[in-house]
């Protein structure tokens, strides 16, 4: 965080807000006059004012066009944001999601009138089962974190259904994403942090020491957030199962495992998928995601309701009828309706176009790209857990003989027109730079990125100020985050003014 | 086909740099017995084939375009101005991620800031977060926030049975095992009593009271008195509101709400079989530290330019971990953008027009239907664009008949409320013409005869 160095002056407005652009009486879209008699409105229940901005369509379009130019995006360039799998988003998927036959279906239509959707959802469940090795899948969760919540609720419900009510501890490695402890914390479980060993694996001795009959399970990210596949996976799974716990897989890193390993085969009991990572549905500037959950046969009864199933087999002349069913011991629904259908459509199209060989290639080339960058960078930046990595790796954003930090390196990368890697996560690496190139980047891009990072390391020694003050070539410079948090200006329309007018 | 750009030569050069012979050598850490399984999936399609295949699925559906729709119950068929999708389709917006790097994310950040501004204005609240998954999860997050606000010391939540059943179900899922009592969540309760019946359920142990506005049956109540009663007990008051209704109705803020949440789908988001939608979440500034989700605030950059950043991030899971109010990470960024574009295109004139059209057309439909023999309106409370009709036959039977005439009938309330067997919840929006309403009435009359 830095303090603003430009005192007192009124900040320069680069793009006015919608409210500043507003001019009374303008209108972008109007609607037909009523074709029915006008009913009287309930006077005592009406609001006084509605000071929304007033703009013409062209004003709105230009405003957002201007704003869009300030954004870095996958369509615009290399976005190696570790853990987020910012791969290219195929354009056909966007068109598919907007087909009127999908986009204009209401979630509560009679089942008979949406058999296309139902067949597709059913098939998607089947495909995700096949890809992951699980026996049942729910498509309902909205994102990875909600998949986790679904998962931990299922784990607890499973134990409780067996009268095993002592289990209150969730084991979570220190390299885990924040959503893992947050999900377990949300349902009131106790979190026990498990350290990593010096190779980046779960520390087996520490794990064993915590394993007893109060363990709900382990939340394991594998490959982990260091981009490393746990070398003792089988033993970790065995250890947890031996004490009666379940192993939850955080599937955020599935992009390394398509056609390579099915987590269900490796003894993982349940896992969420991030369709917006592995299956290339766009991240949307923060969302929507989609976080289906796969489970083993013994957990299938606990899945959120409803799931899609064949409710009438049909015969040679009549196609099967798909419907919704409620698993008998369901934890309940985790959101309205049937999941992020529009996101699922994109992922479905993506899987359909890849087929089994294509899926395996995705992971092979994601891992190839990560290892190539690692090979090119390891002599410049320290990589604390240096071995063949999976789809990402974590380097230390420090340069010997310089005081620059990961943040400075990240900001300087923007001047070379790259999106920075994830920084300061995972927390077990100092000054972490978490680099995930994904399979959709070519060698030229990776070379240019590696060369930029090598050049930045040189700059760090000769001209550290250049990095401290970076970025220089972007439309905006570093932010005064302290001011934002202190003043808390969170909207451009002020309720006080409104109330007094 | 894949989107992998490597030529074989490039691949080999990269393998050589890494120091391995082939791609398989990169996977030695994977347990050998499970390595490289054969996946039983259909063979890869080209883009052309995929387009045809997916069109096949789409064509197997009826839609709110091919049919006339009177379905609502939490998802509404509104007109979506063309300009919205043109903006959403800009790769700069939809292929970016969370604006962690503000120097190169000002587009997303300012757009969220404007979204926050418009949501607070609609609801009459002071702050809005950057979104939740949908209306149901926004309600559940309100419960989380209230629980955190009272540090778990108040363990009772009151929720009106006239809150959307799916929201109540989601709330039950989220709060299971927390030792909470959910009072009021009883579909056999008196559905006629209005806010007074909720008032009776509040006690000193109540953390939060949740009502819907308009309620699940479309009814509009003034919750001012209820809000006073909630506050008298020291509890928080949450209203889940339909944003379209807020174009003309008194804001929940004005009635004394502490938290206003809801389903943002009516604001320019396609029905899309139920998602992705938009959970909006607004509250008073004093609760901000317990609010979940991302938040954008105004600041300046080191060049003296006004700019925006994610702020108060110490509330969130990546810093607070198990002590965070919520685990939310990815949210509904692109849908929040859609709703902001929607509201800015319509402005106050267009948005009011939509709400009034919904109101007038729904009232016309209600009046016509209530004249039919065998049908009557269940409640005489003022309503917005949805109303419940007591029918002479099972709703499923009527809907099957309507479907034959190209009409998607209303929602069968008996599925959720045993007392409302043969009750249909009908939604009318600006999309329904008078002819369509007349046709609905005509067919309803026809069904009652045979
Ligand atoms: C390792 C890991 N787990 C979980 C999540 C949460 O996923 P989502 O953002 O979809 O909720 C993320 C997201 O960044 C992640 O990287």
Image (cartoon, helix red, strand yellow):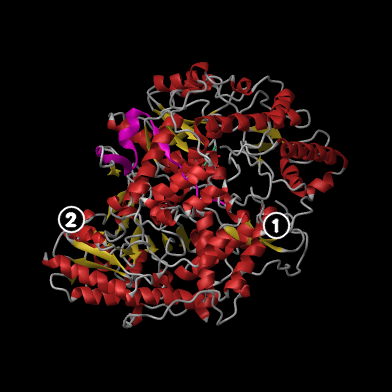
Q: Nearer the viewer, residue B176 or A346?
A: A346
> Where's residue A313, x and y in %?
25, 38
Determine the residue located farthest toward the front in the rendered image.
A317
Q: Which residues are magenta?
A: A286-315
The alpha-carbon separation of the residues under discs 1 and 2 comes to 57 Å
Residue A399 highlighted magenta (yes or no): no
Q: Is residue B215 left or right of residue A179?
A: left
The chain holding disc 2 is B
Residue B200: image location, x then y, percent: 25, 63
Front label number (1 vs 2)? 2
B272 w.r.t. B449: above or below = above
Say above or below: B355 vs B161: below
Q: For the residue labelled by badge 1, is the local secondary structure a helix, a strand or a loop?
A: loop
Q: Residues within 10 Å of mark 2 (few under 14, many from 20)?
A: few
Q: Residue furthest right?
A: A462
Q: Residue at x 39, y 47 (%)?
A: B57
Mark 2 secondary-structure assignment: helix
Residue furthest out toward the top: B33
List x then y, in percent, for residue A411. 73, 47
Residue at mark 1? A480
**How many labels, in total?**
2
Which disc number belongs to residue B16? none
Residue beneath label 2, please?
B418
Chain assignment, label 1? A
């Amino acid at each position: 965080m830095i303090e603003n160095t430009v005192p007192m002056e009124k900040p320069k407005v680069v793009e006015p807000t919608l409210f500043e652009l507003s001019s009374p009486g303008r209108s972008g879209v109007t609607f037909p006059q009523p074709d029915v008699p006008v009913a009287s409105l309930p006077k005592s229940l009406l609001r006084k004012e509605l000071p929304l901005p007033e703009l013409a369509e062209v004003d709105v379009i230009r405003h957002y066009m201007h704003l869009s130019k300030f954004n870095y995006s996958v369509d615009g360039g290399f976005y190696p944001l570790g853990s987020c799998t910012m791969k290219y988003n195929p354009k056909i998927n966007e068109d598919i999601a907007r087909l009127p036959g999908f986009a204009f279906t209401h979630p509560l239509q009679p089942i008979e009138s949406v058999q296309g959707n139902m067949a597709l959802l059913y098939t998607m469940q089947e495909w995700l089962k096949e890809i992951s090795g699980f026996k049942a899948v729910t498509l309902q969760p909205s994102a990875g974190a909600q998949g986790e919540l679904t998962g931990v609720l299922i784990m607890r419900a499973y134990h409780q259904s067996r009268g095993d009510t002592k289990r209150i501890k969730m084991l979570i490695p220190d390299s885990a994403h924040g959503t893992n402890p947050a999900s377990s914390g949300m349902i009131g479980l106790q979190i026990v942090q498990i350290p990593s060993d010096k190779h980046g694996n779960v520390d087996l001795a520490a794990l064993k020491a915590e394993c007893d009959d109060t363990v709900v399970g382990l939340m394991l990210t594998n490959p982990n957030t260091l981009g490393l596949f746990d070398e003792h996976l089988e033993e970790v799974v065995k250890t947890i199962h031996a004490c009666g716990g379940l192993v939850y897989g955080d599937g955020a890193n599935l992009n390394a495992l398509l056609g390579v390993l099915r987590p269900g085969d490796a003894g993982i009991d349940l896992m969420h998928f991030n369709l917006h990572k592995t299956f290339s549905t766009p991240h949307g500037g923060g969302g929507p995601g989609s976080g289906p959950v796969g489970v083993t046969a013994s957990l299938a009864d606990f899945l959120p309701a409803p799931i899609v199933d064949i409710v009438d087999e049909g015969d040679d002349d009549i196609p099967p009828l798909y419907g919704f069913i409620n698993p008998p011991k369901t934890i309940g629904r985790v959101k309205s309706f049937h999941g992020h259908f529009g996101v699922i459509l994109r992922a479905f199209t993506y899987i359909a176009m890849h087929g089994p060989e294509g899926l395996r290639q995705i992971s092979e080339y994601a891992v190839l790209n990560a290892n190539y960058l690692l090979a090119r960078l390891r002599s410049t930046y320290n990589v604390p857990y240096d071995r063949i990595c999976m789809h990402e790796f974590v380097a230390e954003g420090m340069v010997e003989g310089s005081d620059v930090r990961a943040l400075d390196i990240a900001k300087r990368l923007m001047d070379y027109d790259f999106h920075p890697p994830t920084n300061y996560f995972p927390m077990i690496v100092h000054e972490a730079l978490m680099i995930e190139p994904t399979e959709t980047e070519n060698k030229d891009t990776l070379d240019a990125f590696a060369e930029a990072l090598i050049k930045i390391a040189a700059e760090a020694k000769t001209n550290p100020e250049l990095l401290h003050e970076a970025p220089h070539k972007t439309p905006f410079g570093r932010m005064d985050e302290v001011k934002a948090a202190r003043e808390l200006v969170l909207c451009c329309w002020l309720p006080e003014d409104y109330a007094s007018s | 086909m894949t989107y992998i750009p490597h030529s074989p030569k490039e691949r080999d050069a990269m393998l050589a740099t890494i120091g391995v012979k082939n791609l398989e050598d990169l996977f030695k850490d994977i347990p050998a017995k499970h390595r490289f399984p054969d996946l039983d999936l259909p063979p890869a399609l080209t883009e052309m084939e995929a387009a045809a295949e997916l069109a096949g699925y789409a064509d197997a559906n009826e839609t709110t375009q091919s049919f006339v729709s009177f379905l609502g119950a939490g998802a509404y068929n509104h007109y979506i101005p063309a300009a919205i999708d043109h903006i959403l389709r800009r790769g700069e917006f939809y292929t970016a991620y969370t604006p962690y790097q503000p120097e190169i994310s000002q587009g997303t950040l300012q757009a969220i800031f404007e979204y926050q501004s418009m949501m607070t204005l609609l609801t009459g609240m002071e702050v809005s977060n950057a979104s939740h998954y949908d209306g149901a999860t926004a309600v559940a997050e309100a419960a989380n926030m209230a629980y955190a606000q009272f540090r778990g010391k108040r363990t009772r939540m009151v929720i009106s049975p006239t809150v959307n059943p799916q929201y109540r179900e989601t709330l039950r899922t989220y709060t299971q095992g927390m030792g909470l009592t959910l009072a009021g969540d009883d579909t056999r309760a008196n559905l006629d009593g209005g806010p007074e019946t909720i008032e009776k359920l509040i006690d000193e142990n109540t953390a939060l009271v949740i009502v819907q506005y308009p309620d699940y049956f479309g009814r509009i109540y003034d919750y001012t008195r209820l809000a006073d009663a909630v506050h008298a007990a020291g509890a928080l008051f949450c209203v889940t509101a339909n944003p379209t209704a807020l174009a003309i109705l008194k804001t929940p803020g004005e009635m004394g709400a502490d938290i206003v949440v809801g389903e943002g789908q009516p604001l320019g988001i396609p029905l899309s079989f139920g998602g992705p939608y938009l959970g909006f979440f607004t509250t008073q500034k004093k609760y901000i530290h317990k609010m979940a989700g991302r938040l954008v605030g105004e600041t300046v950059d080191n060049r003296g330019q006004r700019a925006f950043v994610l702020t108060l991030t110490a509330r969130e899971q990546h810093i607070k971990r198990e002590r965070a109010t919520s685990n939310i990470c990815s949210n509904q960024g692109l849908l929040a953008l859609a709703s902001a574009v929607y509201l800015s295109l319509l402005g106050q004139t267009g948005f009011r027009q939509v709400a009034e059209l919904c109101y007038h057309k729904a009232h016309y439909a209600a009046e016509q239907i209530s004249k039919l023999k065998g049908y009557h309106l269940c409640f005489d409370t003022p309503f917005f664009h949805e109303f419940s009709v007591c029918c002479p036959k099972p709703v499923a039977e009527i809907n099957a008949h309507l479907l034959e005439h190209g009409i998607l009938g209303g929602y069968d309330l008996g599925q959720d409320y045993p007392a409302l067997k043969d009750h249909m919840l009908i939604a009318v929006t600006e999309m329904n013409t008078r002819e369509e309403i007349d046709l609905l009435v005509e067919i309803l009359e026809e069904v009652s005869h045979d």
